Image (tube, helix red, strand yellow):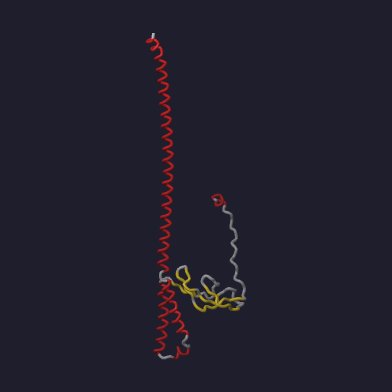
């Protein structure tokens, strides 16, 4: 009897064991898929972080390259600024020496005196030419509109024939180097005349339909 009962129960137990085994295998498979998905998400996140770091590093390197190039350009352009500023006082003294000589003395002087005058004049011009080769430019703004960035107003000159704010006299020429003012020009500015003509208003042109679509 016991052997027969065992034989009768054996198929049910076998089926139950197979069912539980399949369920366990399914749970393991489902757990494996979830683990692979989490690993994939983690790898994608790490990849995005690495990509972001690489882009930031590339941007920082580009900014560093631009700053370095600008610093090198400024060093080359403005390295002689202090020296040039000191040389301007020498040039001013040479010009004052020439202007202090009366016109009669220039014409009536002997050959030696005229040669001295010519030598001083050539020295001044050579110095200014040397400064210009190194980027120093002379500012002689007579007849131009007064610009406080490059000019220093010393006095006003009543003049109804010239637009107000026009430079009518240069007391001392100015100098610039690159985009910077080495020394502003000392000037006299006209007043009492008509105001400078305002900039013409830009009339709107025809509507560009394609541009509006692109916008």
Quadrant including the N terminus: top left
Q: Nearer the viewer, residue 100 or 55?
A: 55
Residue 95, given in percent of the width and then of the height, sits at: 45, 81
With respect to residue 22, does 94 lie above or below? below
Report the front residue among 102 and 55: 55
67 sits left or right of 163 in the view? left
Q: How many marks?
A: 0
Q: Is residue 136 left or right of residue 162?
A: left
How far from the left and from the top, in percent, is residue 87? 42, 76
Q: Position of residue 8 (x, y in %)?
A: 40, 12
Residue situated in front as seen by the camera: 145 or 178: 178
Q: Quadrant of residue 128?
A: bottom left
Q: Quadrant of residue 106?
A: bottom left
Residue at the front extreme, as displayed: 2
Residue in the image at 47% along x and 69% along y: 180
Q: Position of residue 160 (x, y in %)?
A: 62, 77
- Residue in view at x 43 percent, y 90 percent: 109
User: At 44% across and 74% down in the image, what residue appears?
Assistant: 85
**What's the residue at 58%, 58% (across, down)?**
205
Find residue 136 and report its image quarter.
Answer: bottom left
Residue extending farthest to the left is 3
């Amino acid at each position: 009897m016991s052997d027969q009962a065992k034989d009768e129960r054996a198929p049910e137990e076998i089926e139950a064991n197979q069912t539980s085994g399949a369920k366990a295998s399914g749970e393991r498979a489902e757990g494996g898929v979830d683990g692979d998905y989490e690993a994939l998400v983690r790898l994608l996140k790490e990849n995005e972080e690495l990509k972001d770091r690489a882009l930031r590093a590339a941007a920082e390197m580009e900014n560093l390259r631009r700053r370095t190039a600008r610093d090198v350009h400024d060093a080359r352009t403005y390295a002689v600024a202090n020296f040039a500023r000191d040389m301007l006082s020498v040039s001013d003294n040479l010009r004052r020496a020439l202007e202090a000589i009366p016109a009669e003395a220039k014409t009536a002087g002997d050959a030696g005196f005229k040669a001295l005058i010519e030598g001083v004049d050539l020295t001044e011009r050579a110095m200014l030419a040397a400064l210009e080769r190194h980027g120093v430019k002379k500012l002689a703004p007579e007849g131009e509109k007064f610009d406080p960035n490059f000019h220093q107003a010393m006095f006003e000159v009543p003049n109804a024939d010239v637009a107000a704010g026009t430079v009518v006299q240069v007391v001392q020429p100015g100098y610039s180097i690159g985009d910077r003012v080495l020394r502003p020009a000392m000037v006299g500015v006209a007043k009492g005349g008509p105001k400078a003509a305002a900039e013409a208003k830009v009339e709107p042109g025809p509507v560009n339909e394609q541009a509006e679509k692109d916008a």
